[in-house]
Image (cartoon, rainbow, N blue to C red):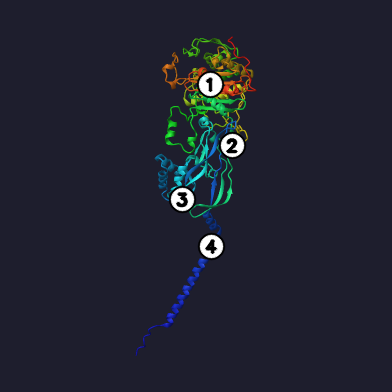
Amino acid sequence: MSQPIRLKDHEKDARLVRNRVVVGAVAIMLLICVLIVRLYYLQVIQYDYHSTLSENNRVHVQPIPPTRGLIYDRNGVIIADNRPSFSLSMTRERAGGDWQQVLDTIVEVLKLSEDDRVLFEKRMRQGRRPFEPVPILFELNEDQIARIAVNQFRLPGVEVVAQLVRHYPQGAHFAHSVGYVGRINEKELKTLDPVNYSGTHHIGKTGIERFYEDSLHGQVGYEEVETNARGRVLRVLKRTDPKPGKDIVLSLDIKLQEAAEAALGGRRGAVVALDPRTGEVLAMVSQPSFDPNLFVTGISFKAYAELRDSIDRPLFNRVLRGLYPPGSTIKPAVAIAGLDSGVVNAGSRVFDPGYYQLPNYDHKYRNWNRSGDGWVDLDAAIMRSNDTYFYDLAHKMGIDRLSSYMNKFGIGQRVSLDMFEESAGLMPSREWKRATRRQAWFPGETLILGIGQGYMQATPLQLAQATALIANKGVWNRPHLAKTIEGQPPVDENPMEDIVLRDKSDWAKVTHGMEQVMHNARGTARKAALGAQYRIAGKSGTAQVVAIRQGEKYDRNKLQERHRDHALFVAFAPAEKPEIVISVMVENGESGSGVAAPVVRQIMDAWLLDEHGRLKSGAVPATVAEETAP
């Protein structure tokens, strides 16, 4: 008989349930342990990290850009200041994914042009820090501010902020000397200190603004702010104030600057006036000029194209970058070189039939006076600007000595202390020609260097400095624009070596010849000195723009206006105790004594005479109004 079948094993089922409960309980305990360990790791071991992370989500450090230093002229007149202005800023991260659509909305709301739209996008794409607002439109008016406020719901990440913007109240007067600031570009961004320039969007581009950028900029400040989830500032937790930039007082005089501009009379040219005793630049004019305010907040494409493509080149700094053959203005320096090297003395004479010929050569090097001046000594050669005398002097000196002496006068090198745009010019030599032209030096090339033609090129500033060295008897004071920086004068860390002559009286001999140019009845610029209450020492010059063939005469009627000779003049006064040195270049002015010399006289009167036309206190009066020819 078979055993009965058990329908259910209760003991087995009970064991199975107990086992499952045990396994489940163990699993739960293990998971609880893992959770406890994880909580311990997060809450205890990594407490500092997560606390900082949380704090950073709530607290942000915002840079406070420093106030840019002010720039004054020597009399305390403001040349560059900071003007409050409302600008439109945009933070790309807060504008959402389609920030370009927000730009389109801005253009629509403010009724701007497509050029503005392109400019906005260009600014937004420039390198920047995350969550850093980027100014895209400056100097908002009340109507624009109201339009933005009404449409704020359509413009996420966009806000109107008040800030200080650079302003040049004197306009075009000091555009080439003070320069201007502009937006920081990608190239500049790579070279700047990212910390100190946090929140700063402008940097000096030219002139004093660029050279003294480190002093003018100052030190950035910071503030820690608490924000909500949308990034809006709730409160300021901590603040470190920025250090404003240093104020700079320039040696420029606005009244003399205006007098120099008026003397040029709207002609293209350059004027630079120095104090030979200190090297301070009293006036610096390059005409035509431009309004630097156009560049501060971003010049339009059309306006920039007009300046860039203008045939008169208003953006070109003729004082520092204009390279011109110095012409006869270099003859006084050549005379000093001849005297000091012993090649000639004050009594050495040369017969001038109207031309000069090298031994065994047929070529005639013409004097400007085709009929000749007969026998001329050093004094007469400077007074009459006699080319034949200086042809002979240059030939006797040779290119090696001539080049060496001209270098001492600053020709062929940068002479300024704080003008980074200055060109070095060119004083040729045998080595220079061999390296650049792969040719030997020819004797005829030395001759024309003696009258400031040929390969020689100099800026108006370098001609002023060479003249200042004669006025100062060889003492080098490098030209500079900054008079004081936060009350301290600039320091020349690389002073130039003074010119020490074997016979100090040679300075007076050359100066006397320059005085004859102005005050002798046969002087080439005697008309410009008529009625002067002080003695002037000067020298005219003419720089050829196009070459004239052998045997031909200069005919202005056959030349286009811009192909005519440049007119130059250098001078200092009072001759006995110089207080001012002036260099003038008038493009295509043709006559140094007829066009440039009157400009010099007008500027000198503005500096040395008071408002009543009388000689200022301390100035040396003229001892002889006019001398007669011997």
Q: Label 1's element? A: helix
Q: Earlier in the sequence, mark 1 or mark 2?
A: 2
Q: Position of residue 80 (x, y in %)?
A: 54, 35
Q: Label 2's element? A: loop
Q: Quadrant of the N terminus?
A: bottom left
Q: Earlier in the sequence, mark 3 or mark 4?
A: 4
Q: Position of residue 261 (x, y in %)?
A: 52, 25
Q: Nearer the viewer, mark 4 or mark 2?
A: 2
Determine whether label 3 and label 4 are within 8 Å by CB.
no
Mark seen at residue 599: 1
Q: Earlier in the sequence, mark 4 or mark 2?
A: 4
| Residue that badge 4 annotates | 41
Amino acid under disc 2: Asp
Depth check: give the residue in front, 540 or 605: 605
Depth check: give the residue in front, 61 or 29: 61
Distance from Cα at disc 1 to Cα at disc 4: 84 Å
| Residue that badge 3 annotates | 94
Q: Earlier in the sequence, mark 1 or mark 3?
A: 3
Q: Earlier in the sequence, mark 2 or mark 3?
A: 3
- 182 left or right, relative to 242: left
Mark seen at residue 247: 2
- Badge 1 crowding class, 10 Å Cα cut-off, few under 14, some 14 to 19, many 20 or more, is many
Amino acid under disc 1: Val
Q: Residue at (42%, 34%) from the top-left corner?
A: 302
Q: Quadrant of the C terminus?
A: top right
Amino acid under disc 3: Arg
Q: Earlier in the sequence, mark 1 or mark 4?
A: 4
Q: Label 3's element? A: helix
